[in-house]
Image (spheres, helix red, strand yellow):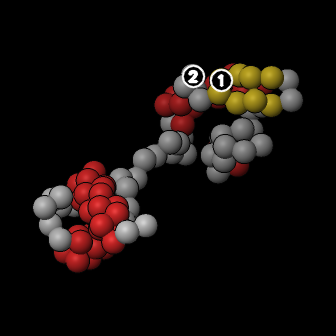
Amino acid sequence: MSIANYLTALDAQRDQLARNLTAMGVQASESEKLNTLVPKVLQIPSGRPEITLFQSGNDALATYGESIYTFYIDGYRSLMGFADVYPNFCCAHNGYAIYY
């Protein structure tokens, strides 16, 4: 591979790096030099917003009863249906644990 080919490939990678940085929320431009873009990788936010899928508590069955389904020995059923059959599931007696 010739030096010209290497430079063309490096230029394409620089452009892709700029696009990737922009996609990750970091200001970058394809016109910037590679030695300016590379340190910007450290500016990529390290965390994503926290998402709560389930929050235990005394209102868990009211909140999630018909939107979360379980699969147990006897098949699928809603969280509310499971709690009807297994009354100690997700109750104050066992600290609102969602395991049985």
Lower position in the chain sequence, tag 2 or tag 1: 2
Q: Are marks 2 and 1 in contact (CB under 8 Å)?
A: yes
Residue 57 location in percent, x, y? 53, 44
- Amino acid type shown at disc 2: Glu
Q: Is residue 35 above or below residue 22?
A: below
Task: Write down the residue under mark 1.
Answer: 78
Q: Is residue 68 visible?
A: yes
Dot 1 crowding, Cα within 10 Å, few <14, some 14–19, many 20+: some
Q: Residue at x 34, y 63 (%)?
A: 5
Q: Give the side of residue 54 with respect to residue 97, left or right.
A: left
Q: Is residue 31 left or right of residue 1?
A: left
Occupied quadrant, residue 26: bottom left
Horizontal arrangement in the rendering, residue 51 relative to residue 29 (left or right): right
Secondary structure under tag 2 reads loop
Labelled disc at residue 66: 2
Q: Residue at x 18, y 58 (%)?
A: 30
Q: Position of residue 91 (x, y in %)?
A: 65, 41
* Picture mark count: 2
Which residue: 13% across, 61% down? Answer: 31
The image shows residue 35 at horizontal and vertical percentages of 23, 77
The amino acid pointed to by label 1 is Ser
Which mark is drawn over residue 51?
A: none
Near-viewer residue (70 or 7): 7
- In the image, residue 79 sits, relative to residue 10, either above or below, namely above
Mark 2 nearby-residue class (10 Å; few <14, some 14–19, many ≥20):
few
